[in-house]
Amino acid sequence: MSMFRAAVMAMAVSAALALGACGNNENSGSSTTNTAATGSANAGGKTYKVYLLPKVKGVPYFETCDQGAQEAAKELGDVDLQYDGPVDGHADEAAQLVKQWALQGADVIAVSVNDPAVLAPAMKDAQNRGVHVITWDADAAPDTRELFVNQATAEQIGDALVDTLAKDIDPSDPKAASGEVAIITATLTAANQNEWMKYMKQQLEKYPQLKLVDVEPSDDNQTKAKAATETLIKAHPDLKGVWAISSAAFPGAAEAIEQQGKAGKIQVTGLSTPNDMKKYVMDGTVKSVVLWNTKDLGYLTVYTAEAVASGKYHKGDTSIKAGRLGDRKIVDGQVLLGDILVFNKDNIGKYDF
Amino acid sequence: MDDQTRLATDAGKAIGGGEGASYQPPQLASPSFVAPTLTQRVGPFAHELLLFVVLVVGLIWAKQIAPLFMTVTTQQQLLFNVWDLALLSLPMTYIIITGGIDLSVASTMGLSAVVMGMCFQLWHWPMWAAALMAVVTGTAGGLLNGVFVAKIKVHPLIVTLATYSAYRGLAEGLSLGFASLYKTTSVYSGFPTWFTNLGQKAFFAGPDLRHPHWYALSAAGWLFIAAAIAMGVVLAKGPFGRTLYAVGHNETAARFSGLKVGRAKLLIYALSGLASGLASLNNAAEYNTAQANMATNLELDVITAVVLGGTSIFGGRGRIIGTVLGVALIHETREFVSWHYHDNTLIRLVLGSLLIVAVAINALLGRRSSRK
Amino acid sequence: MTTVDYQPLRPPLTFRDMLWSLAAKREYGLAVLIALIVIVVSFRSPSFLALSNISDLLVYCTQPAIVSCGVMLVIVTGEIDISVGSMLGLLTAVMGTLVSSKTALVPGFGWPVWAAILVTLGLGTAIGIINGLLVTLVRIPSIIVTLAMFMILASITVKIMHRGNITDLPQGLRWFGIGTILGIRASIWIMAAVLIGTWAMIRYTPLGRRIYAVGSNAHAATLSGVSVMRIKLFTFALTGFLVGVATIVTTLGAYDNGIGQGFELLVVTCVVVGGVSISGGVGTVAGVFLGVVLLMIQKPVLIFLNLGPGWSNWDKAIQGLLILAAVLVDHFAGRRKKPGAGGGH
């Protein structure tokens, strides 16, 4: 039996090692901050457990949101912030996390809602357990959350994407922009992208001369996005513009246009953090990148969460204090971050996120 | 000689060793040869015992560092997340015992869910009929796999690799195609309460809903327990179970001894499809959503659970109880990493390491004992 | 075992055998299928046959074709490797992190390109060797080893890439993807070298013959003095090395953490469609290359056919049906049942 005992020991030790490795990582990782220890600003002694859920963990967009959130948590001092999310962006895994956090006794859960239908049961369940649920980045049904930190609605994003591309195609008279256009999306079933596309197609009706010829999935894979864009360019000689509406599709599509020698002739736009697309904006392949200040979004979300948890925010308030961002308006249960930004050659150098 | 036999032969050779060019008696080439393993050395349930001890030690440790994690309420709530994986892992055990594999289980879930959603939302079927349709779709999908494997005799890895794409693709094509045809959404939601309760509420919870009985489980949970017991008994005691082991050990020999190999294979792949259909119902009820991307990548977790549970990927060896422990170990590990370390990016790392270590220990001990 | 398993150790050499094997080969079916597809699509859209498009199509084939050569040999020995996708992602992340000036130890000074390439190839080979050792020494089934490796490497990649995409890639590194030699992309030359090299190794070296011997009948191979263990270790190491080569020939201008997702299934599919028997012992470089071509032109062909925005919804279904069709055609053509082709299926 000694062999057996050794085996048991080995298994237990290795499992402990594997988990112990995570422990080390926790200390060095950027995703966890326990600011309660430093909390000189925290006179009352109560720290609020705030959980921040991105749609996908590990992509630049949400990592920069996290940077802003950490900054706010440090400033506030009474926030114990945890940032975690599904790696593959599966909405049901997001729902499982919301459920876990509610059980852990969270004070506030801030959800970037990947799929309102999937997350609704978990969010309601959390509310029933006395947790404040707010949404940020993407909204859910109003009865499942207290506030929505709104940087842009799906409709505004869709409109901005269409308007920006039309302007890039024909700067003098965007309404008369003409030619064929195509969309490179994430996966065909991605809830957000499908929501944006719905509004993009609506907005596209205002540009009668732009003809949508194809919607291609990239499966969030840059290589596929690049190949699809290159083929579209060749298959549609009259192609004038491409929307690449996932974080992997945008650099892939831009690279395709550059390699096909179509920079300036075919426009591409999409949503991306400025740092990731700076290279293509500076060399002229991409005229405009649409986004908002993601660092500020994370920052404002944590301030909102703290206000909700500490009772600084009362239902019906029309503004909220958000550190360096000053007072932010609240309209219809939505905390407004500000306008959608369009980065171009002139201003992209000013942003670092 | 066909694929299974070939795999079994190779397995026999690989396990039997002989790379050292020492002379091997010819009868060792017989596919039925499998080296004595840990199992034979330290009792019939050694691997299961090992998993059980690891699980218990792990959970005690988890209780020390995160007391809230190991409460009944928490565990009960977290159990809602495991049933898809658990349901799929049972027939997968059968399939892997015969030396096969089914990569299409998660895609079949997506297809079943989409069919159900379309029946319910586009054609306004009653919910029970739509749900039945999902189960029928799943079973049909599994049956098709079975026909390819058992009748046309294509290697199961290839068949299910193809249907892995095809079923998911059909789900996407149908839901998106009909969405643009009917000008509606491709995400089906808004199922009746009795249906969503099946996935969201625990049965036998008792009068106090905040503190349900410790044995309160969702519908899928009860189904899983019943199925695990039934399938465990059939595998261990029934003639059907013996057929499965015989096929996994040596398919040719099984055929020659008059066992209905083709029928058995057909049945287990259909069973796998049935489980996918049922799991898709559970998933749709739990999240009140049916869509084409349901349970993407779940097949990898299912295979991991079964293999972790001690079922040999070459066939001929494995038990339901091991699979249940494998599922439990994966579930608890996954939930705990996410609960305590707040880092989902680590889950795969930990699970991958666990899988390799567990199987390596089994393999190393099995080999050492075989050299004696 | 009812039949004794005589696999030819390598493509047969007598004229009659050659004719016999021609009739039975998957390559011709695939070539005809690809030709038919190309003819149809170029009737509809002649620009499909433009030289620039053919060059691009070949570039799409480079990564899968290079890695498929390794995975083919692994499968020929009766094993499998499904870690190549995660490995591609990890190697890309490591290579990018090394050369990028932003992530360098001394800011502004990334590693020189040649050193980063050496590390990439070395790390790929090392991971391949780890896979191989776990399979041969520890004797864990290869599908489990590489499944675990698939999970582990993907996690590490996300960790490495947490600082965001890597966009400042030096020109010297990008040359391998987009540079040209004699008007043809460097990556195509590299792919051709790998394909020809693998073919030559199989055809003309004892090592190649041994790989097939191991796959046809490991027991017989052992008896004839071939070290099954070393051969398998070699194929895994080679696969890791080739993933390193595939990493270098990427045409992307920015590295993110999603690179390589789904790549392992693509490669296994290409190899299987290319006629490599999953049970080992059977497979040719030409077949695998044609499998890669078929899978990689599928998407461009659908775009060129210009069927409208809704058609991409059926992409995955078409891909799945394509594989099923390939398998079925193969089955009903009776390739495996021919006495000379070996009973090994």
Image (spheres, coloured by chain):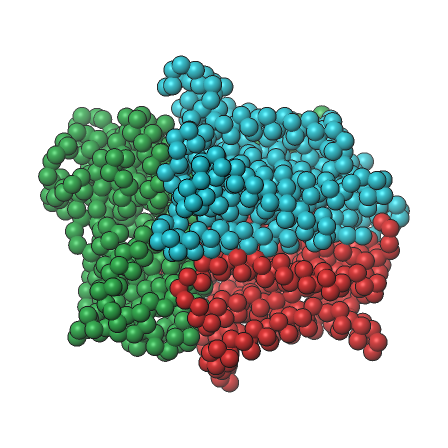
Chain colours: A green, B cyan, C red
Left or right for A8, reference A329: right
Residue C137 at x, y = what percent?
A: 70, 48
Residue drawn at (54%, 76%) of the image = C40
Is A83 in front, or is C12?
A: C12
With C8 as the anchor, is C244 left or right in this view?
A: left
- The residue furthest top is B207
Tag count: 0
Whether residue C170 is visible, yes or no, is no
The image shows residue B202, relative to residue B355, as above or below, that is: above
Q: Residue at x 70, y 31 (%)?
A: B235
Residue B84 x/y as whole percent: 51, 36
Q: Residue extending furthest bottom?
A: C182
Residue C53 in picture, x, y percent from top left: 47, 78
Which corner quadrant of the image does residue B213 belong to? top left
Residue B137 appears left or right of B178: right
Residue C290, position in %: x, y?
Answer: 62, 70
- Image quarter in which the C terminus of chain C is found: bottom right
Q: Which residue occupies 26% across, 74% down?
A: A178
Q: Quadrant of residue A79?
A: top left
- Residue at 35% across / 53% down in the picture? B183
Nearer to me, B289 or A163: B289
Q: Is residue B5 visible?
A: yes
